[in-house]
Image (tube, rainbow, N blue to C red):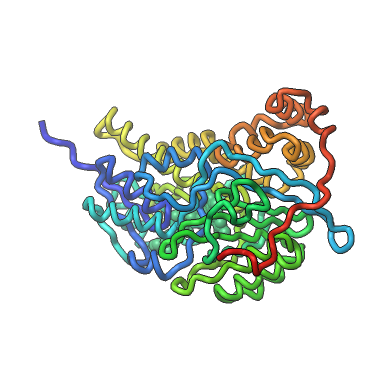
Amino acid sequence: MAEQPTKSVAIVGAGLAGTSAALGFLDAGFDVTLYSDRDRASLRDKVPPTGVGVLFGKSREWDAEIIDDLYQVGNTTGISVRLHSGSGDERADVLEFNPDYGYVAQAVDLRLRADDRLGRFLDRGGRFDVGHVDTARLDEIAGSHDLTLVATGKGGLSALFGVDESRTHYHQPQRRLLQVTLEGVDHGPDTFGYRSREGGAYSLFNLDSENGEIFVGPFLHKDAGATWSIIVFAKTDGAWAPKIDNVVDAQSARQTVVDIFTEFFPKDAPVVSSLRVIDSDPYSWLTGAVTPTVRHAVGHTASGHAVGAIGDTAIAVDPVAGQGAQNTLIQVAELVKAARARLAADPNATFDAQWLHDEFEKHWERRGHASVEVTRLYLGDPDYATHLELSFPAAAVNTDIASALFGLLSEPNPLLSLRTRDDVVGFISAVAGVPADDVLARFVPAGQFSAAPSRESVSV
Ligand SMILES: Cc1cc2nc3c(=O)[nH]c(=O)nc-3n(C[C@H](O)[C@H](O)[C@H](O)COP(=O)(O)OP(=O)(O)OC[C@H]3O[C@@H](n4cnc5c(N)ncnc54)[C@H](O)[C@@H]3O)c2cc1C
């Protein structure tokens, strides 16, 4: 019997989504071409990473379907959270908690993750075509492949996919963003040890009710190794947002972060001030903003060929709850499995618009919807005011609730069943094992958070 010809897959864009899909489909037996507007060296060394890309727990299981876990640095087991409110004389330390996640979160430079995938793809015979793909070229590509996936991120060719207004909650960014990776402070137990017993095995999350949030986390930088990645999520009407305008390079990014800590989080400022820019990487920083957008995952080229959206092209979320890269990996790993199963069942099967649509709907149910909602929770969307009002004080007095709150970064789906105040009260009671009222009655606002020793005594 004649052997069935191998089905061909074209993937456009070589970020995390594109390189993961390229390797996944190749390993599943497809004939894959990856199209990229940048060559391999440029993807690794001439652009900033698209984000920090922390994989919180569960998504790492899907990632393991694509590639082995190659990274020992940047793994964390919990988070030290502090909430401040008010400004001027009214500013107060409100609450703190330091939950163990109950899972391992992994923060690895996305340029390294993508390069490792691309390297394996090339070693195993994948084709890599370098050149900008416009809509005319995409039409040709889609016409000559059995399946074409678009992974060009939030910009690129995303306009080919209409916005799904029923799933898109915002039409402008909810935070201004500043991300910078800095070196010079290790991940040992003494680093930030005044915040939690785990020190540098935990990330930090500082919330400021007026101005936004700051994440500080142990990170594996592609060249410098063990480093710290910092993200400022500035509320658009807060005091931090205009400071981001001054950022033009790594040095000014670091200085802006140090200035914000000195003014708003002086207890952490001694350690943060000890961090230095990574001289070998002028692209270790970025500024920007994400308009959270869910698109219809099937588009059509000029000649009518169906193409599918993956990664940020399909669902772009604000990074405050760290869902984008996780969502991407889950979508890609499941799509590879679905395509392989489809061919195993019927070697003549096609990957048409209906199939692409159906697979995206499954992804939306499996993870996409929950990742959008947990992001709205962490953005403090008014729809989640009750959830936050109850769960943060409860987390401050009950570590199981704190872990459950951050468990949502790994597995956000339970949030979808917490609709009403009664649902949230029931959730707190169930996790705590005692009535929610008893938990909340124990909460008293923090007096003073502990502080880092002066800068001179911090080891670097
Ligand atoms: C500050 C910040 C922090 C984040 N932190 C987290 C986190 O902790 N956890 C998490 O899960 N997610 C996080 N994210 C989200 C995560 O970074 C993204 O979801 C993920 O990197 C998206 O990958 P992608 O491949 O879809 O897009 P991209 O990384 O944008 O890749 C798109 C690629 O396509 C190429 N391209 C574009 N147009 C064309 C074209 N016309 N032709 C050919 N190639 C083209 C681009 O050059 C690029 O290489 C964060 C995001 C930000 C901004």
Question: Would you place residue 68 above or below residue 135 in this image?
Answer: above
Q: Residue furthest right?
A: 89
Count of all numbered marks drawn on residues in the image:
0
**Which part of the image, by quadrant, shows the N terminus?**
top left
Q: Quadrant of residue 400?
A: top right
Q: Is residue 59 left or right of residue 246?
A: left
Question: Would you place residue 125 above or below residue 260 in this image?
Answer: above
Residue 266 x, y percent position in the rendering: 74, 63
**Which part of the image, by quadrant, shows the C terminus?**
bottom right
Q: Is residue 155 left or right of residue 260?
A: left
Q: Residue at x 26, y 44 (%)?
A: 30
Q: Residue at x 36, y 43 (%)?
A: 66
Q: Is residue 364 visible?
A: yes
Q: Quadrant of residue 128?
A: bottom left
Instruction: Say which of 235 and 456 sits in front.
Output: 456
Q: Residue furthest left?
A: 1
Residue 357 x, y percent position in the rendering: 46, 39
Residue 423 x, y percent position in the rendering: 73, 28
Q: Residue at x 58, y 48 (%)?
A: 202
Question: Would you place residue 276 above or below residue 231 in this image?
Answer: below
Q: Is residue 315 visible?
A: no
Q: Residue at x 69, y 65 (%)?
A: 454
Instruction: Say which of 203 and 168 sits in front.
Output: 203
Instruction: Say which of 55 and 236 sits in front.
Output: 55
